[in-house]
Image (cartoon, grey):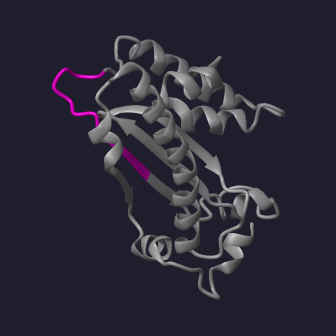
Amino acid sequence: MLLFLAGNMRPDIAFAVHQAARFSHKPMKVHEHAVKRIMRYLIGTREEGLSFGTDSSLNLEAYADADFAGLWGVEEPNDATCVKSRTGYLIRLGGCPLVWKSKLQTLIAVSIMEAEYIALSMCMRELLPLKRLLKEIDNVFKFDLEGALAKLTVFEDNALAVQLATMPKMTPRSKHIALH
């Protein structure tokens, strides 16, 4: 139930639910407390919601970020997932979230720039098909999304990742990312 809510209706609990679900094969008392806390949060915020305002412009924008080796030194030192970075991205239309994801990267990044570049790539792989889908919907239902689809804004906080993404070809130090 919590995974459904996090993935489809409540992006605000996605990270907490994922962290609790990682231990579902061997839950402990602390994980039970975490799930109960998430449930109390949901009960306390059941009147909150996301909606399109009447004055909002339908701009399509995306935010991508990564946490480089976020669990290193926190959990089991011999566990390979502890050195993996976490990707997070959010895609909004008119200020309302359409797509969001928080996921461990499958590739082990060796630098912050690499982790951010992988996160940006994952975000773009979701954003570009979404743009095509919105264009098809606009052709059928005439939502007047032409302005939103003409300009996509992607926010990334790492200048080197942005520089690598805008280069016409891969560099020798980054070509291994393209091979994955």
Residue range of the region highlighted in magenta in the rendering: 52-63
Q: Quadrant of residue 137?
A: top left
Residue at screen point 43% across, 22% down = 140
Residue at screen point 66% across, 64% down = 73
The x and y percentages for residue 49 are: 36, 18
Residue at screen point 37% across, 56% down = 155
Query: Taking 32 as reference, is 67 left or right?
Result: left
In which quadrant will I find the N terminus? Answer: top right
The x and y percentages for residue 104 are: 66, 51
The x and y percentages for residue 124 are: 52, 53
Q: Main secondary structure of the magenta part?
A: loop
In which quadrant will I find the C terminus? Answer: bottom right
Which residue is the extreme one toward the bottom? 172
Q: Nearer the viewer, residue 92 or 78?
A: 92
Q: Nearer the viewer, residue 134 or 53?
A: 134
User: Vertically, is 89 above or below 161?
Assistant: above
The x and y percentages for residue 69 are: 62, 64
Query: Taking 63 as reference, is 175 left or right?
Result: right
Which residue is the extreme one toward the front? 139
Q: Quadrant of residue 21?
A: top right
Q: Nearer the viewer, residue 155 or 27?
A: 155
Q: Is residue 176 magenta?
A: no
Question: For the image shown, how many numbered marks are present on the structure?
Answer: 0
Query: Taking 43 as reference, is 114 left or right?
Result: right
Q: Is residue 59 magenta?
A: yes
Residue at screen point 43% across, 35% down = 135
User: Vertically, is 168 above or below 66?
Assistant: below
Q: Nearer the viewer, residue 42 or 53?
A: 53
